[in-house]
Amino acid sequence: MNIEDKITLYALNALDADEQAAFELELQKSPQLRAKLAEERAIVASFAELAEPVTPSSKMQHQLMARIDADIVSRQPRLQTQTSVWANITNLWRSIAPVGAVFASVLALVMGIWAVNTQRELTQLRNEWAIISQPGTIAANVPPTNKQSSARATVFVTPGHNQAILSVANLSAVDTKQTYQAWLIRDGKPVPAGVFNTDATGSTQFIIKSDVPINGKELVGITIEQAGGAATPNMDKLMFVGPLT
Amino acid sequence: MDYTQFDDAALIAQIARQDRNAFEALYSRHAAQVLGVVMRLLGERSLSEDVAQEAFWRVWRLAKQFDVTRGNARAWVFSIAHHLAVDTLRKRKDGKNVELDAEDENGETRDLPDEMPEVLTQVWDKISGERVRTAIKQLPEAQQKVIELAYFNGLTHKEIASELNEALGTVHTRARLAIAKMRELLVDMGAKL
């Protein structure tokens, strides 16, 4: 098989897996080869016009846009948080620099805490990313029980997986003796899905963990409980409840 | 902003800046054709929608690597969808789990945008489906068959040779000549090559 054959067959996705991998190594080394391949791919792409268009379901668009929204959300607040942390450190440095070496150790401590926090955030981000990047991830808006409330809760879930992301916004602050608690409700039976608190704006993202795969037929609820959480939900303080799909 | 006036490359430049509306515009423009290609390969509606969705997700994720001055946006989108569909078809044929792997590094390497000679950029955005259909009908039947088996049946060159009971070299030649002839025909129809 000569190089022209390989380019054409690669553009058509008609090489075997082994041949394809070997050709990709050649491609990496040769800009000329990549340019030639690009020409072939453009022509091959025109074959797509031979297929009859099929209108996608609204579900497909909904799922896709939910992934996009989750991606946007997962990036923006964290960038702001890190910028804000950095600004704080800069301000702190300006204020303590004249005092000298004693305060340098304070700064080192702050930097250490910041590094730990950043590492935690990165780990959390990776975990969240692993969930929302799954094909078939859906976003369910869980309605507040008080219809006048501006609070919002969205669950990103891939049916068949044991984890989901709960994203909330505009929740009221609770005092230190209380906490928000998430519930998965299966066949009418509530199962604790973790406790969480919000930031100053009433927002947070929280990973719901389930002992069994989430099948999408569950309900999700959020209540306010005593700090540490409860084994059964306080229905007087039910803030959100709704289906996952 | 009225994104209907944007060409594909401009939309992808916006998508690289995390512009949700630009992404929706690109999706609206191509989703039906992308799903059409994927369904022609896979048949099954639900699986095809998963694959098409994954293709658009990769466009979103890799858009920042797309060079608007050197890439053919439309070819890139369809190339991602086609190879995902072919990979899925082959996994299914081999009895493997066809669940799409979002972290497939090899897949991502293949999905990176091409760098094209400038003269080719944007050419195919201007070619209608009717012109492509007219052009392909002018190919010799044997070449059409090879293209059909490769592009829409997802067969490898060896499988095509076996299916047609022809030598591998014959299949290679037909594939190469078909692409060259398509290029020539499309130029004759007004593509600026």
Image (cartoon, coloured by chain):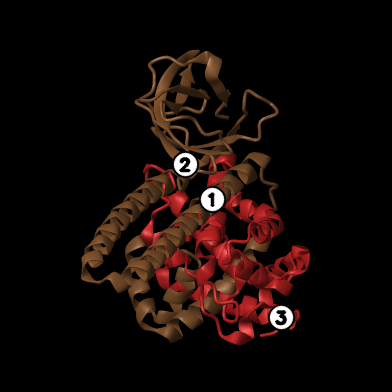
Name the residue tied to disc 2: A205
The answer to whether one can see residue B178 in this image is no
Query: Which residue occupies 68% across, 78% down?
Result: B123
**Crowding near the residue tagged with mark 2, few <14, some 14–19, many ≥20 C-alpha atoms within 10 Å:** many
Query: Where residue A147 sits in the image (x, y, percent)?
Result: 69, 26
Q: Colour of chain B?
A: red
Is B106 placed above or below A219 here?
below
Name the residue tied to disc 3: B191
Do the residues indicated by labels 2 and 3 lie within the same chain of the protein?
no
Q: Which chain is brown?
A: A
Indicate the chain on which mark 1 is placed. A
Which of discs 2 and 3 lies nearer the camera? The answer is 2
Query: Which residue occupies 46% across, 48% down?
Result: A133
Is A79 placed above or below A69 here?
below
Q: Quadrant of residue B110 in the image? A: bottom left
Indicate the chain on which mark 2 is placed. A
